[in-house]
């Protein structure tokens, strides 16, 4: 169940960030190098926040090996 909640949180955050970026029309500025670097940094930050959200919600249990079962 925690995996499902983690995926829902990641989806909600990505949707919010994507819609915000799309509505701000920042993607139309990608031809300028400074704007392109800023856009890339924002997208990287969205990805990092996705990882933080997932691991804060699920912990590290999904990635521990089941030994002796």
Image: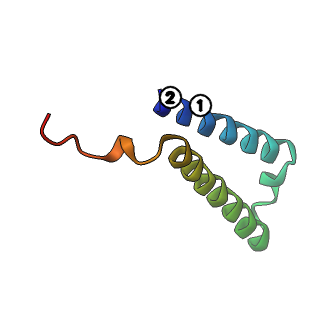
Question: Which quadrant holds residue 37?
Answer: bottom right
Above or below 16: residue 41: below
Q: Outermost residue toward the bottom?
A: 34
Which residue is drawn at the image coordinates 63% and 53% (left, top)? 49
**x and y percent of residue 65 in the render?**
24, 45
Query: Around disc 2, counting alpha carbons within 10 Å, would you say few (fewer than 14), some (14 to 19), or many (20 or more)?
Result: few
In-image side of 18 versus 7 (left or right): right
In-image side of 36 versus 67 (left or right): right
Q: Which residue is mark 1?
A: 8
**x and y percent of residue 45 in the render?**
66, 59
Question: Which quadrant holds residue 39?
Answer: bottom right
Do residues under tags 2 and 1 come within 8 Å of each other at their CB atoms?
Answer: yes
**x and y percent of residue 69 in the render?**
14, 33
Of 39 and 31, the residue lying toward us: 39
C-alpha separation, residue under disc 2 versus residue under disc 1: 6 Å
Which residue is drawn at the image coordinates 59% and 57% (left, top)? 48
Above or below 50: residue 40: below
On residue 22, which mark appears?
none
On residue 4, which mark appears?
2
Above or below 12: residue 24: below
Element carrying mark 1: helix
Question: Which quadrant holds residue 67?
Answer: top left
């Amino acid at each position: 169940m925690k995996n499902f909640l983690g995926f829902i949180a990641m989806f909600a955050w990505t949707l919010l960030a994507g819609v915000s970026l799309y509505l701000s029309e920042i993607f139309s500025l990608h031809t300028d190098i400074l704007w392109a670097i800023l856009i890339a940094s924002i997208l990287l930050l969205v990805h990092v926040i996705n990882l933080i959200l997932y691991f804060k919600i699920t912990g590290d249990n999904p990635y521990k090996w089941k030994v002796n079962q």
